[in-house]
Each structure stands twice: as C-alpha cells, then as structure tokens.
Amino acid sequence: MNVKLGVHVGQQNMSMPTMRSLWRRLDDAGIDWISAWDHFYEAPPAGGILDHYEAMTTLGALAADTEKAKLGCLVFYVGYRNPASIAKAASTLDHISNGRFELGLGAGWHEQEARAFGYEFPSIGTRLEMLDEACTIIRGMLSQERTSFQGRYFSVENVANLPLPIQPRLPVWIGGLGEKKTLRLVAKHADGWNAAYTSPQNFERLNKVLDEWCEKLGRDPGNIQRSVNLTFNLACTTVQVNKEREAIRESWGPFASRIEEGSLLCTVPEAASRIAEYVDAGAGQVNIALRAPWNEEALTAYIEEVIPAIRAM
C-alpha cells in the first residue's frame, strides 16, 4: 500500500526523557513522520492539570534527536506567534533537521488555554482571516530574499529570513475540516492538507471539496498532499477496545462521537484494514495521535505487526 505512516505525539503527561526515547524508537522503526501539537495545556481540555511542553522548543529537540523521519507540528495556531517568527523558526528547524521539517498551520481551537495564557481568541472567521495573512507572510519568508506585506492583522516590511530553509520549497500544511473557508485556504496556500479525527466517508467527501477549490483557484490538486490523524485507541482484545471507547467518551464528552469516528479504535488484526479505508478515501499519509498513557502492548504491535502488514498490502 502506497501510504506514509506518521505518529503525532502529544507532548503531555510524560517526562522529556521518555518522549525523546519514544521519538528515537519511532525513527529507528522507519516511521515516515513525527509531529508535535501546538498547545500550552493538555488536549482534550482539562484546565491545565497535566505536564505539557511548548511546541517550538520541543521540535528543536525532535529535530536533533532523529535522523530519517520528516517532522513538524500539526498545527501551529497563528494567534500564538507572530507569523514572521514562525517563518524564522521553521527555517532554523529545517537546518537542525537537515532538511526534514514541514510546517503545519491552522486557525486554532483550544480556547481554554488561549484565555488562560492571555491570548485573545476571536471568532473563527477572524482566525481564518489571520491564517490567510500569516500564510502569505510565511510563504514569502521561506522562499524569497525579502518580504513585505501590510495586512489587517499582521505586517512585515522588507524582512529577510537568512538562512533560507535547506529545502527549495519547505512544505506548508494547513489543518482543518472547514469546507467553505479552510479548504479554500489550503487550495490557495498549502502544499498539504491535514484532517484530524474524522471518518473515512467524511474525509473522502472533504477531499473532493478540496479538489473543487483547487479547480476554482487554478491549482493542480495533485500538488497538494492529503493526510489524516487518528487517535490511537488500538487494543489487543475486544474487551480492551470497549475500554478504549469508554475512555474516549469520558475524556471528550460532547465531542466524543466525532473523535470516535476518527479513531484507530479496533483490535490489532483489524488495524491495517481500518487504515486502508482512509487510503481508499484519498489519504496519502495516516498518522496515529498518541496521548500518554497509551497501551504499550498495542503500540508495539502497531510498530511490529501493523506497519509491516500495511507496507506489504
């Protein structure tokens, strides 16, 4: 099966040595992509009760600790950092990783942490306008000697970003499920689109919507990569699967049904077929989202049994 396999590691509820050991294990196992998320509090939201590491600094360690996997963040909320600083960090991370960094951007969703840390959290319409402006600035700074832009939310004037990234075109991903505005921004700006926690059927539908936006904006749909994140709820027995289902409902509350639809919630023998559903729906990359504590027996089985089975399909 021609699909890239990634692991989206939530940098929460574990020590830094444990997390760094996990990255090395995944890199040694041939995982194609390793990412962090851009949160200050834990996800799902719980009021800041778990240890949690900041994303940009975490990625510096990830870039230095690994050698083969592509790496990034799915996704940076542009309301937390000036876009020019994101572009500068992206270029730096590309050099630390020797050309393996890919930049994910989004409109954010974790209002609880934003308010707690003193950030404004405007309406989704405003946040998407901010994302549009940020993408324009960041693309310019990642690809040209000087960039100027005057926007409603962000501005730069004749700014340089030296050294430029190692990659001639550092990939920019946009994450989100909004078909009217988010997918339009993907078609306008991005090299890749990431959808988090949605069913194969909805992924396929949104994939076609993205193709339609590409046609309207004059983009070749084949130039945009497509990926999906699935929460890691793999288990070795049916009894354990039912416990994982209950854990989703307890953690996510009113959002549980949507999260469950976009989960790797099955036994080990069923996992390859579950992932194949997303590949058939148009995903070129499937990432499992790990939140500690996870089922270590299931993770080992995923690495040692499921991944080889997928590669052989």
Image: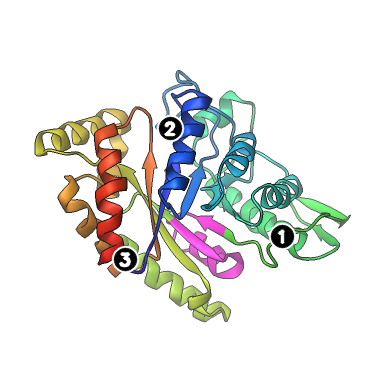
Q: Position of residue 193 (x, y in %)?
A: 48, 61
Binning the other alpha carbons within 10 Å of mark 1 as few (below 14), some (14 to 19) or many (20 upward) gives some
Per the image, the residue denoted by label 2 is 43
Q: Which mark is residue 279?
A: 3
Residue 176 magenta-drawn?
yes
Q: Residue at x 47, y 52 (%)?
A: 33
Q: Residue at x 71, y 46 (%)?
A: 89
Q: Is residue 25 left or right of residue 253?
A: right
Q: Position of residue 209 (x, y in %)?
A: 41, 70
CA distance for labels 2 and 1: 33 Å
Q: Residue at x 60, y 55 (%)?
A: 100
Residues at marks 3 and 1 touching, judged by CB atoms closer than 8 Å: no
Q: Amino acid at mark 1?
A: Ile
Helix or strand or loop: what does disc 2 sit on? loop
Q: Nearer the viewer, mark 2 or mark 1?
A: 1
Furthest residue toward right: 158
Q: Nearer the viewer, mark 3 or mark 1?
A: 1
Per the image, the residue denoted by label 1 is 166
Bounds of the magenta span?
173-194
CA distance for labels 3 and 1: 30 Å
Query: Where, quadrant-wise, is the C terminus in this rendering?
Result: bottom left
Helix or strand or loop: what does disc 3 sit on? helix
Residues at marks 2 and 1 touching, judged by CB atoms closer than 8 Å: no
Binning the other alpha carbons within 10 Å of mark 2 as few (below 14), some (14 to 19) or many (20 upward) gives many
The answer to whether 220 is drawn above or below residue 278 in the figure is below
Binning the other alpha carbons within 10 Å of mark 3 as few (below 14), some (14 to 19) or many (20 upward) gives many
